[in-house]
Amino acid sequence: AQRVTQPEKLLSVFKGAPVELKCNYSYSGSPELFWYVQYSRQRLQLLLRHISRESIKGFTADLNKGETSFHLKKPFAQEEDSAMYYCALPSGGYNKLIFGAGTRLAVHP
Amino acid sequence: DAGVTQSPTHLIKTRGQHVTLRCSPISGHKSVSWYQQVLGQGPQFIFQYYEKEERGRGNFPDRFSARQFPNYSSELNVNALLLGDSALYLCASSQGADTQYFGPGTRLTVL
């Protein structure tokens, strides 16, 4: 069965520290994966997708098929990065996403 | 464009009642998807509609139904509400098989 696992409910770091939000997936075939972010009192929005290989707001994510992972990384966390982060996997189309449970990132001054 | 809009913002119902949630997609978007987000969990896919036809259904009981109108807006209906239906219901729209844009959600509380 297709599944997305985010093992950490909360990740707490200090400003300037490196950040790694973990995402593991279960999928047969070549997956495309997404990271969505939800800032306080805002709607869920796309942060990045692996196929575009972009760096958004300093975040990057690399698909590791051997480890079935798509971890989100940023070398130097900022306070404005504090938010809920969700990893997602399309299931039969981009409009049908399987989401992980999410990780709350808290960046302290 | 205001983005995806949903109404109402909040809703309180009692067990056994039914509820209708509404979604207006971004102008030009023909696909609408519905998700349920229970507190502490990620969104869970319920339905997808494209050009007024159901294109996908998640693992939800038949009490859940939806439809899409000619103007591409959509309704999600839930009958015989249970306490466990309390959640944030999200609507997302896209032009096709592309990035989904989410609405602010409707918070449903079932007492």
Image: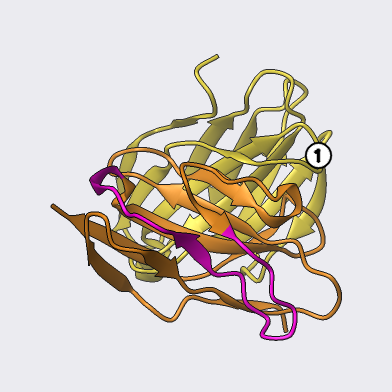
Chain colours: A orange, B yellow
Badge 1 crowding class, 10 Å Cα cut-off, few under 14, some 14 to 19, many 20 or more, is many
Whether the magenta-drawn stretch holds residue B18 is answered as: no
Relative depth, front residue between B43 and A76: A76
Foreground residue among A84 and B33:
A84
Please tell me whether residue A63 belongs to the stretch shown in magenta. Answer: yes
Give the residue displayed 35% in from the left and 64% down from the top. A18
Pick whichever, B102 or A80, lies toward us: A80
Residue toward you, B101 or A64: A64
Q: What chain does badge 1 belong to?
A: B
| Image quadrant occupied by the N terminus of chain B | top right
Where, by quadrant of the figure, is residue B97 drawn?
top right
Please report the bounds of the magenta region as a residue range.
A61-80
Amino acid beneath label 1: Tyr
Residue drawn at x 76%, y 43% is B49
* Above or below, B89 relative to B9: below
List the residue tagged with mark 1: B50
Q: Secondary structure at mark 1?
A: strand
Task: Tell me if A100 is positioned left or right of A104 in this view.
Answer: right
A76 on left or right of B20: left
Residue A100 in percent (x, y) is at: 52, 70
